[in-house]
Amino acid sequence: MLTKLLFPPQWIPTQPYLSLPSLTAFLKANGCDVEQVDINVSFYDEILSKKGLLPFYEKAYSRFRELDSKNELPPQHQKQYHALGSSILYGEYILEEIDNAKKRLRNKENFYEFEEHFGIFKILKLGLKLASSAYYPSNLTFNAYDMRYSCRSSKEILSAINDREENLFIDYFEKNTVPGLLADKPGLIGISIINTSQLIPGLTLASLIKKADGDIHINIGGSVFTRLISEVSGNNELFSIFDSVIVHEGETALLYLIKYLAGEYDDIEDIPNLIYKDGNDIKVNRISPEGEDINALPTPCFDGLPLDRYLSPELILPILSSRGCYWGRCTFCDHSYGYSGKYRPRNVELLYNDLKALKSKYGTGFFTFQDEGISPKLISALSDKINENDLDISWLADSRFEPAFSKELSSKLANAGCRMIYFGLESANERILGCMDKGIKKENVLKICKYCADAGIWTHLFLIFGFPTETREEARETKDFILQNNKIIRSMSFGSFQLTKHSKVYENPRVFDIRAILKNDNMDMSLWYEYDVARGMSKRETDDIIQEFYDELSLKYRDFPIWSNLDREHLFLYISHFKKNLNEVPDLSEQIDRILKKRPDEKPANVDLTNMELYPVLNEGVFIGMFNFNWAQLHQAMMTGNSLRKMQMEKTNVLFDTNNNRILTVSGFVKDLLVNCNGKSSLSEIINIIGEKHQMDHSDAEIKTRNLLQGLIDKNIISSRTGIL
């Protein structure tokens, strides 16, 4: 019996996710016929192409014309009109540029030029915005998929998976995904859902497969449903989409489910970690308390995945050195809840052999450890093995500020190829660290960061603002600690505290002065909750502190525009690429200097606009559009979060400058001038065309055209075929 394992959208498509390769390797080792399919990367690769994006553009264009042709625009359609109109303005340009942008992203020479990297991603993000507008108000990015339906409600999820007008995945999956999945008649399809952003796309796919072939057994796995065992086991409607769920670790459970479906195993009730429908009942089998024997698991298998389609110039493979968290006491965290049993590190010899085999088989030396935190003992032993055998790899890992993290250990890790370490500091205030049960001392933080910096390892810190009872003064202590040590602490991620479903704070709210957990019965799939605190900062105060910190970081860190705009895998590649010497942390601010050298401060020199042989052309990223409603008025309302009364038809001409993110309303004369700035007509020809169309005396047309061109030059809207005019 053929089993297909699927990884659905939405997840950032920069590297494979580890769930399918781990399961695939285990099933293959046990003689199963299994195929893994990364639908997420195929989806992004397809829609970020001219061929794949064209249907979205055509749909958006049709919907826009339908609204634009009306005599009036009521408030309920104004946001959609604005979203569609923006996309239509730049749509044709994106269609022409997107294939080349994706190609350049995968090219090492282009990728490591940050200004070009940023420009490439601007095009790709506009492509996703265009695709989203066709299914307004849904919004797809590289980091999220949002609909007006909440993924925290099973009722709303069930509505979303049937809403063809707003769910962009229905049309896509029906045409591009489901036929291929069913062609070789699998007996079981497993869908891995590890993030809430995958819930609606993943269950949409499950529903479409079930409608196409009801005989296929559909199983859902992953950490999201693991956190929702009681909710899922009481929801018959969800089981109309799929047949079973495997929670916690899935290797053994999935193997025996396959055997059961193939008629090779009789007792479905004995399969651990399985939730399944039995007649009108939903059964929850025994949850295994031990988890898998990590040393009995094979090396992950990435065979069958389209490794050349990920959005990175280098193949980066994920790997796991342990399951569970060796600390496991942080009161805000439930990351390790998805694993059964206690912390289990993999044997160092096996782990080294994993790295060696993966490098040899797939031709890459870039690895990201996916552990919650690698212990100093394990990471030290692994580095010894790597150094002894001269295995040439680059890697990143998450770890903790442990006293064992010495200067000698940092040097050893750097020699073994460690380029980045992610540390969870969370707070620089000792009281808050105690409330979090972090088990770290502030005095060790700078010491360890300096050890890493001296060894040439980039440190990235995680910070949390707004932990229950935290005051503004305590939050500012964290903020000031980072800013005062910007030469040692290289980058960070930060956000507000979230009350997660299985954290110790959630289970003991009174201990943390949480007055009330604000639950909504309709939000039955919630993995986090709103709450009220008896003391400490409010949500608004927390947001203010975060914004204040963000603003100050941009002033204190010269390379802030780079590392704050790169995702984890791409930052890792940048650091690996720009690392010049073993004991030196790469200075990404050099990239800022290179950019500034390419952008001289002085304005373009004055030119002789009496030269009639100039060939003006709109700068790349500048577009002209004509609308039947007052675009300037509408755009202003949208930017301020307002809506207008019913709008009457009022034709307007719009200039959209994506380079500076500005939208300008222009006169008919300026519109005609810009339309003719196509790089094919000389200044002399443009003056003649404009003068004739607007019935102007030639000298008047010439003066007005030149004056307008000078203003457009100053605004960097117009260039010539040979450069700035």
Image: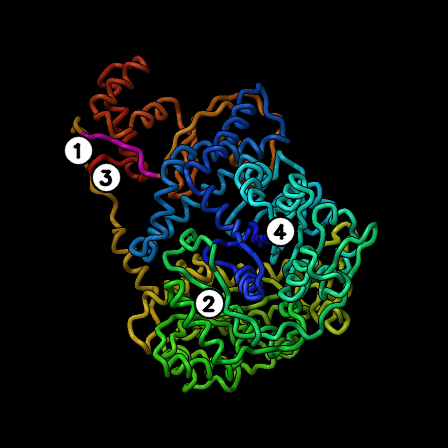
The amino acid type of the residue labelled 3 equals Ile
What's the CA distance linking mark 4 and mark 3?
A: 57 Å
Q: Amino acid at mark 4?
A: Ile
Residue 671 drawn above or below residue 174: above
The answer to which of marks 4 and 1 sits earlier in the sequence is 4
Separation of residues labelled 4 and 1 (CA atoms) = 68 Å
Residue 609 part of the magenta segment: no
- Residue 409 visible: yes
Residue 310: x and y in percent read 43, 53
In the picture of the structure, the residue carrying the numbered disc 1 is 608
Of residues 288 and 75, the one drawn nearer to the viewer in this rendering: 288
Q: Badge 4: how crowded within 10 Å, few (<14), some, or many (20+)?
A: many
Residue labelled with disc 2:
368
140 or 234, nearer to the observer? 234
Q: Is residue 32 left or right of residue 128?
A: right
Residue stretch in magenta: 614-620
Residue 189: give its label.
Answer: 4
The image shows residue 406, relative to residue 199, as above or below, that is below
Is 446 left or right of 163, judged from the image as shown? left
Point out the image quarter for the C terminus: top left
Q: Residue 89 sits in which quadrant?
A: top left
**Counting other residues with Cα less than 10 Å from the Cα at mark 2, is it few (<14), some (14-19), or many (20 or more)?**
many
Reading the image, the residue beneath label 3 is 724
